[in-house]
Image (spheres, rainbow, N blue to C red):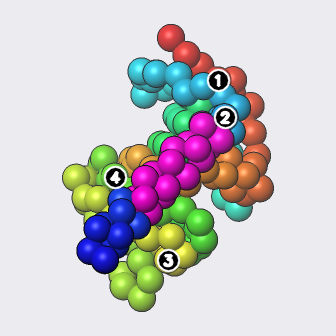
């Protein structure tokens, strides 16, 4: 009886492993764009303009279109003193904000806190987030989003800026 149970256990493990192995090539075949390794200078990337903040631009560094990443998007922005990112949320993507310079007032869920150069803000998906530059100098930040499909968010909420994509 014990050997029968052991055989069933081994068979179950092998069966599950084989089923998982068969699915891997299907996932890999969905990739449309092969990821491209990139090194982008501060002024390189796709310049975009917020529709909700006319005249305010940001730079898309990495996403499915720029670099071919299926798993993340990276943007940079320099916020002028007094500028603010309205409170919003990303239902299907976690976000990291790396504050490079300046001082911001960050609304994260029901919490409001100042963030200065060197701070990292973690925003789990579906969490309300907003930020305002409360300093006298630009608030420079790098944002990283998880999840494929972020390009659709960019295309819905932002208009293409007049500047072309620049690469070295």
Mark 3 falls on what kind of element? loop
Please name whichever residue, 71 or 119, is drawn nearer the observer in this view of the structure: 71
- What secondary structure is the magenta-colored segment mainly? helix
First reached walking from the N terminus: tag 3 or tag 4: 4
Are discs 2 and 4 less than 8 Å apart at CB? no
Task: Measure the C-alpha gap from mark 1 to mark 2.
Answer: 28 Å
Question: Which stretch appears magenta?
Answer: 11-28
Residue extending furthest toward the front: 1
Residue 73: give x, y in percent of width and height: 53, 45
Q: Quadrant of the N terminus?
A: bottom left
| Residue pictured at 44% horizontal, 70% vertical | 124
| Residue pictured at 55% horizontal, 16% vertical | 167
What count of labels does the image hold?
Answer: 4
Q: Of the numbered discs in the image, which one, if any, rests on residue 98? A: 4
Q: Is residue 132 left or right of residue 105?
A: right
| Residue 136 visible in the picture | no
Residue annotated with mark 2: 29
First reached walking from the N terminus: tag 1 or tag 3: 3
Residue 92 drawn in magenta:
no
Residue 135: give x, y in percent of width and height: 34, 61
Q: Residues within 10 Å of mark 4 (few under 14, many from 20)?
A: many
Please name whichever residue, 134 or 2, is drawn nearer the observer in this view of the structure: 2
Mark 1 falls on what kind of element? loop
First reached walking from the N terminus: tag 2 or tag 4: 2
Of badges 1 and 2, the one in the foreground is 2
Of badges 1 and 3, the one in the foreground is 3
Residue 109: give x, y in percent of width and height: 44, 83
First reached walking from the N terminus: tag 2 or tag 3: 2
First reached walking from the N terminus: tag 1 or tag 2: 2
Mark 2 falls on what kind of element? helix
Q: Of the numbered discs in the image, which one, if any, rests on residue 127? A: 3
């Amino acid at each position: 009886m014990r050997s029968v149970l052991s055989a069933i256990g081994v068979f179950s493990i092998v069966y599950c492993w084989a089923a998982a192995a068969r699915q891997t090539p299907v996932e890999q075949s969905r990739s449309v764009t092969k990821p491209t390794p990139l090194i982008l200078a501060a002024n390189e990337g796709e310049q975009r303009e917020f529709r909700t903040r006319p005249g305010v631009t940001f730079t898309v560094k990495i996403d499915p279109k720029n670099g071919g990443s299926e798993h993340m998007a990276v943007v940079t922005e320099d916020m002028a003193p007094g500028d603010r990112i309205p409170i919003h949320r990303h239902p299907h993507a976690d976000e990291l904000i790396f504050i490079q310079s300046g001082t911001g007032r960050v609304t994260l869920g029901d919490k409001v806190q100042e963030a200065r150069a060197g701070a990292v803000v973690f925003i789990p998906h579906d969490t309300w987030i907003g930020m305002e530059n409360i300093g006298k100098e630009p608030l420079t930040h790098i944002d990283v989003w998880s999840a494929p499909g972020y390009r659709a968010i960019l295309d819905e909420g932002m208009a293409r800026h007049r500047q072309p994509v620049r690469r070295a």
